[in-house]
Image (cartoon, rainbow, N blue to C red):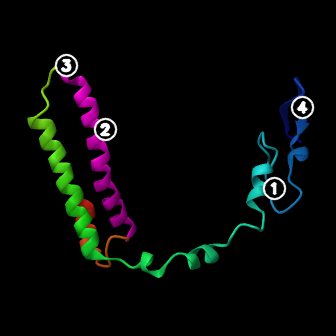
Amino acid sequence: MCLSKAVKGGSLQSTSTAENKMTDKASEQEFSGLEGKALKAALREDFPSRKEIMDKIPRECFEKDTLRALTYTGISVSLTILCVQIGYFLIPMTLLAIPLWIAYALVTGTVVTGCWVLAHECGHGAFSDSVALRDTVGYIL
């Protein structure tokens, strides 16, 4: 029998893993410091099913709009190019400009995240129904 140590009431005691087994559906799982409370919460039946959740989401949320996706791609790429130009042409490379470079990094990082999200969605197939378009845009971004 495997023994594990647990701290209870300020003293160190040895307990067998058999004492740490759940008695319901997940009986083969060992408990952590929560003693299975997280697993029991996940097994509750009052959580909605996947079907119930999917039925509540409007159908138009699942329809791919290639024109809209390309519009967002154009906006995201344009903003990224604008940020790069601002950094290259307007912010000097001096110690006094360090606060500007920090602000620039925060703004540019946020803007470039838009390109990453679009490329990521291309990889998941959510960008367009056209595989060739998804692959092209995804690889370019």
For the point 83% across and 63% down, the residue is 25
- For the magenta stretch, what is the residue range? 96-125
- Residue identifier under label 2: 106
- Secondary structure character of the magenta stretch overall: helix
Q: Residues within 10 Å of mark 1 (few under 14, many from 20)?
A: few
> Looking at the image, is mark 4 or mark 2 nearer the viewer?
2
- Residue identifier under label 1: 28
Q: Is residue 128 above or below residue 73?
A: below
Q: CA distance from mark 3 to mark 1?
A: 61 Å
Secondary structure beneath label 1 = loop
Return the x and y of residue 44 as percentages of the image width and height. Answer: 78, 63
Return the x and y of residue 104 as percentages of the image width and height. Answer: 24, 36
- Looking at marks 4 and 3 on the same chain, the residue that comes earlier in the sequence is marked by 4
Q: Are marks 3 and 1 in contact (CB under 8 Å)?
A: no
Q: CA distance from mark 1 to mark 2?
A: 47 Å
| Rendered-image quadrant of the N terminus | top right
Q: Is residue 51 above or below residue 95?
A: below
